[in-house]
Image (spheres, coloured by chain):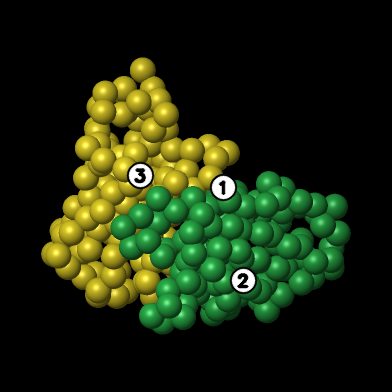
């Protein structure tokens, strides 16, 4: 069965970076884009960007341009999302999701990133 | 970027009654080359990732109860829960995937029991 398992919660100081992993299984990793979506507490879903695991091509929401980097390790079937220059407003749960045509049937469990001094 | 709006922000419906959620996009999500609307609906319960309910605006995901249905085309879409059950209490989001470079979600609609 398809599974996306994310790394554990992180606590970071303002200005630091965080790297969240998304380990996939149950399908061919390079066949489907991985997208990242975040959700602040009590707020809605915010799309961050996509990555093609086959080519490494990426696309980011304008809001995160210059601060986010999405990468992958095909030998580990794992995708990564790194967000830099963290600020308190980045405190949120970060989800990875497998994209079919752009809709997401499979999601990771979410990773809480807390930014606090 | 395509902007998604939803109405209402929240609604309370009696058990067994119909719930209707509207979603509007700032530009058409209908691709004339394949005649598909690039619109999905999700259900999210507290502490869980979203669950895909509907894609291509009206195709129910496997395993989703048939009381959930999606309709609409172009810029106006609707998610209908024909007979609300207690387990349907959640927040519902629409999402456009028409723009291949930037996907966006609606702000969400909270559904409660009256």
Compared to residue B14, the image places residue A46 above or below, namely: above
Compared to residue B37, the image places residue A38 above or below, namely: above
Query: What chain letter is assigned to the residue under label 1?
Result: B
Asked whether, in this view, residue B102 is left or right of residue A41, the answer is: left
The quadrant in which residue A32 appears is bottom left
Neighbour class for label 3 at 10 Å: few (<14), some, many (≥20)?
A: few
Q: Are marks 3 and 1 on the same chain?
A: no
- Residue receiving disc 2: B72
Disc 3 from disc 1: Cα separation: 27 Å
| Residue A30 appears in the rendering | yes
Q: Which circle marks residue A8 in the picture?
A: 3
Neighbour class for label 1 at 10 Å: few (<14), some, many (≥20)?
A: many
SS category of the residue bearing label 3: loop
Of badges 3 and 1, the one in the foreground is 1
Query: What chain letter is assigned to the residue under label 3?
Result: A
Query: What chain letter is assigned to the residue under label 2?
Result: B
Q: Which circle marks residue B107 in the picture?
A: 1
Disc 2 from disc 3: Cα separation: 40 Å
Image x and y of residue A117, in percent: 36, 17
Chain A appears in which tint? yellow
Residue visible at 25% across and 36% down in the picture: A67
Of badges 2 and 1, the one in the foreground is 2
Disc 2 from disc 1: Cα separation: 18 Å
| Residue B52 appears in the rendering | no
Of badges 2 and 3, the one in the foreground is 2
Which numbered disc, 2 or 1, marks the residue that appears first in the sequence? 2
* Chain in green on the image: B
Q: Which circle marks residue B58 in the picture?
A: none
Neighbour class for label 2 at 10 Å: few (<14), some, many (≥20)?
A: some
> Observer-nearest residue: B46 or B30?
B30
Asked whether, in this view, residue B75 is left or right of residue A13, the answer is: right
């Amino acid at each position: 069965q398809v599974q996306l398992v994310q790394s554990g919660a992180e606590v970071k100081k303002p200005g630091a970076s965080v790297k969240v992993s998304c380990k996939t299984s149950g399908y061919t990793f390079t066949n489907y884009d991985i997208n990242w979506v975040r959700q602040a507490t009590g707020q809605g879903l915010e799309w961050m960007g996509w990555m093609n695991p086959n080519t490494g091509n990426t696309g980011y929401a304008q809001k995160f341009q210059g601060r986010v980097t999405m990468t992958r390790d095909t030998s580990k079937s794992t995708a990564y999302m790194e967000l830099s220059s963290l600020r308190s407003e980045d405190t949120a749960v970060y989800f990875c999701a497998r994209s079919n045509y752009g809709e997401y049937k499979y999601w990771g469990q979410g990773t809480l990133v807390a930014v606090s001094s | 970027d395509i902007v998604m709006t939803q109405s209402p922000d929240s609604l309370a419906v009696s058990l067994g009654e119909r719930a209707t959620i509207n979603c509007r996009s700032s530009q058409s999500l209908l691709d004339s080359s394949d005649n598909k609307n690039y619109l999905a609906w999700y259900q999210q319960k507290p502490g869980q990732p979203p669950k895909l309910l509907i894609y291509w605006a009206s195709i129910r995901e496997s395993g989703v109860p048939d009381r959930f249905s999606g309709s609409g085309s172009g810029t106006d879409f609707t998610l209908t829960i024909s007979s609300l059950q207690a387990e349907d209490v959640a927040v519902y989001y629409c999402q456009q995937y028409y723009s291949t470079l930037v996907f966006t979600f609606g702000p969400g609609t909270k559904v409660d029991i009256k």
